[in-house]
Image (spheres, rainbow, N blue to C red):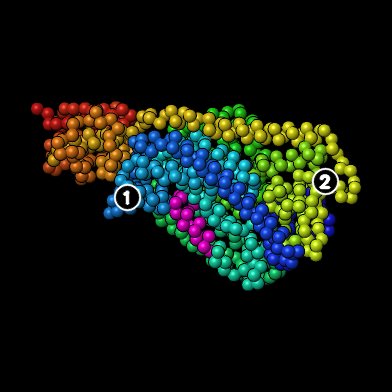
Amino acid sequence: MSVDRGSPLPTRNDDRAEPGDSARAVRISGGDVSGGDARRRLTARVVRTGRSDLRWAGGVGLVLVALDVVLRAYLRRPFWYDEIWRGHFVGEPLGSFWSELARANTPSAVGWVVIERLGGDLLGWHAWVLRLPGFVALPLLGIGIVLLAARFTGPVPAAFAALWICLNSTLLDLGTQLKPYTVEMLAAVVAVLLWMGAEGGTARGAGSAGVSDGRAGGGLDHGRLARRTAAGLVSLLSVPAVFVIAPLVAADLVTAMVRARRASRADAGGALAAGGWRALEALPALVLTGANTLFFVGHQSSQRLGHYWDAQFLAGRGLGGGLSFIGGQLRDFVTGTPPGIDRYDPSLLHPPTDGTWVSLWLLAPTVVLCGLAGVALLARRHDGRQVLAALGGAQLAMLAASAVRFWPFGPTRTNLFLVPLIVLVVVAGAADLIHRMLKIVRTGTPTPRRHVVVESLSVTISADDVRSLPREIPAQVDPAAGQGALPAGGGHAARISANPGADSGEAVPGRRPLWRAAGVVVVVALVAAGIGAQVSSAARDGRLYEQRDRLRGLDLTIDAAIAARRLYRPGDLVVVGGRLMRPGWIYAMEASDDAPRRPAALPARTAHGEPARIPRPDTLFFSRPGEGEVARDVAARSPAPRRVLLFVFEPDVAATRADLADLRRAGWCPSEVRAFPLTGTLTTLVHCH
C-alpha cells in the first residue's frame, strides 16, 4: 500500500503514525472534517470490530461451557492424593489455620483460599463445591484469551489461540481437579488486560504515554490508577502474580520517563516526575501483590527446602550446568503443545506429540519462527511491548528465583499462568506471516511496507495491519481492490494504492510465479502446522472423558474416615500414618460433607445415623513407618486406649508390618482388617488375650 511519500502529516495534537502502529490503533482527536458522517462511519467500524471480537469470545466461551458439561462427572469425583490435602488447608478452622498453612505442600494464593473457603462454608464441604472455581474459570479463560489476542490479531486467530490452550488435555486434566492453575491463568490474562486498558497500539501519543496533557510527567491518571488497582486485586488469586505485575510496573516507569524526556525535552527531573506519577498509579497493585507474595505465599514455601523441584532449580549448577539447564528448559518450552504447557508431571495427560520428533523437528521450528515474528510485531506497539515486558520479565524473574530455590523455572504446572501470553505471541506472529505471504501471492512480489497517514478527523492509521483495514477505515477505501481514498480536510482525498507505483502508471515489477509459489507453500505449511498443533493439543481429551470414573490414589479416604467413625468408641485411639496422609485424613474426618463412594463396603451405620467425627486429640499421626514410632506413641498414651484403629497409606503398608509386630509384642492383636484399594488399610487392634 502506498501514498504520497512526504513526511507524516501532523494532526491537531501533533500525533504521528510510527512504524508498526496497528490498524486497530485509530485515534480521533476532533480535527476539522467535512461533516460528521465520516466520523460516525469510522466510529461505527471500530464498534463493529469490538462486537465481532465479543461474538467470537462468546462463541469460544459457549464451547468451553459445553465442555464443562461433558466433563461434569469430575466435579463429584472423590479427591485423590494430590487434591485432598488442599481441601484440608483451605478448610482448617481459623484458630489453627495459620499454623497448619505452614505445612502446605505447595503454596496457595490468599484470594483463591478465600473463594474456596467461602464456597465450602456457604454450600458445604463437597468435592464439587471446591472444584467449581476451576470449572468456572475455564470458559472465562477462553473468553479472556480471545479478547486479549484480538487486540493484536483478528478474532479468528484469537479464537484459535484460546482453543489451543483451553482444549489441551493437560490443562483440562488439571482444571478438573482441586488445583488453582486455571484460575491463575485467568488472573494473568485479566491483569494484563486491565493494565493495558484502552491504551492503543500507537508508539507515541497521549493514550500510551500519558504526557500530553500539559502537566509535569502527565500527572496522576485516575483511570490508570483504578485499572492497576483492579489488576492488583485480581493478582490476589494467583501465587505467581508478582512475576507479571512487577515487570509491568517496571515497563510503565521506563516508558513514561523516556517519553516524557522525548516529548518535552525535559531535564532529568521531568523524567523522574513522569516515572513518579506512574509509580504512584501502580503502587496499590505492588502493595497487594507484594503482601500476597511475602506474607501469605512466603509462609507456605517450605517445600523449596526439599528435593521435589530440584530438576527445575538453577541453584547449584555452576556456569556450564546453568547454561545447559536454561537451554534444556527453553527446548522443552517450544516443544510443548501449546508451548509452555507442563511437560514433566507424569500424572497428567500430555499431548501425544510432546517429546517426539514431530514436536522437535516440525512444530518447534514453526513455534520459534512465529514467536520471533510475533515479538517483532508486538514490539512496534505500546500495548504489545507491555505484553512482551510481562512475558519476558516473568521468565527472567522466575529464572532468578530458581537460582535461590524460590520458584521452579521451565514448562511446569506452576508456570502455566504464562501460557496465554506465550501463545499470544506465537499466534500473532503466525497470523502476520500468513497475511504477508498472502500479499505476496496476490502481488507476485514482496512489496516494501509503507505506512498510511491521513489527516482526516485527525485519524492516524497504519497499513502495517492491512487485514483489519476493511473493518476500521471508511467504506470508500477498498484494500482488496488495491486502491481507494480517505477524506481529507478541505474536501481533498488521500489516494491509497496497494501497488507501489500504480498511481503513477508504473507497471508492478516482479510478478513472478516463483514468489507466488513460495508464498503458497509458506501459508500451507503454517496452516498445516496450526491444525496439527490444535489436534495434538486436544488428542487425549477423549481419554480424559473415559477415565472420569477411574480410581486414583487416596480416592477412598472419605470411605476410610467414615469407616473409622462407625468403628470408633469412646476410649479408642486412632493412629494414622503414611507419606502426606495427615492433611488428607484431617480433611476427610473433620471437614468433608461428601458421602462414601462405596457405602456397601463400610461397617453398618447405627440407628441414629452417621456417628460424630472423631476429635483430633484422639488421633495420632506418624510419618516414619517401620521405625518403632507407632508402638512408642501408643505406649506413651495415658490413659491407655481401649482399642487402636490403625490406618496406613497403601504404599506404606509393607513398611508398617514392623510396627504391627512391635504392637503385638506390646500386647495389641489385630481383630479386623479393612482394605481400601489404592488408599490404605484400616486395622482394628485390641488387647491380646
Instruction: For marks 2 and 1, give the CA distance.
Output: 65 Å
> Is residue 563 one of those drawn in magenta?
no
Q: Which mark is residue 499?
A: 2
Mark 1, residue position: 122
Q: Nearer the viewer, residue 309 or 383?
A: 383
658 relative to 478, above or below:
above
Helix, strand or loop for the magenta stretch, by majority:
helix
Element at label 2: loop
Residue 78 appears left or right of 109: left
- Graded by Cα atoms within 10 Å as few (under 14), some (14 to 19) or many (20 or more), the crowding at tag 2 reads some
Quarter-wise, where is residue 619 in the image?
top left
Q: Which residues are magenta?
A: 225-241
Point out residue 545 in the picture as x, y percentages from the top left corner.
Answer: 44, 31
189 relative to 456, above or below:
above
Say which residue appears at 74% left-offset and 33% top-offset: 520
In this view, which residue lies farthest toward the left?
A: 689
> Is residue 228 one of those drawn in magenta?
yes
Quarter-wise, where is residue 208 in the image?
bottom right
Residue 346 appears left or right of 497: left
Looking at the rendered structure, the kind of residue marked 2 is Asn
Q: Nearer the viewer, residue 624 or 281?
A: 281
Tell me if I can see residue 324 in this picture.
no
Looking at the rendered structure, the kind of residue marked 1 is Leu
Quarter-wise, where is residue 527 in the image?
top right
- Graded by Cα atoms within 10 Å as few (under 14), some (14 to 19) or many (20 or more), the crowding at tag 1 reads few
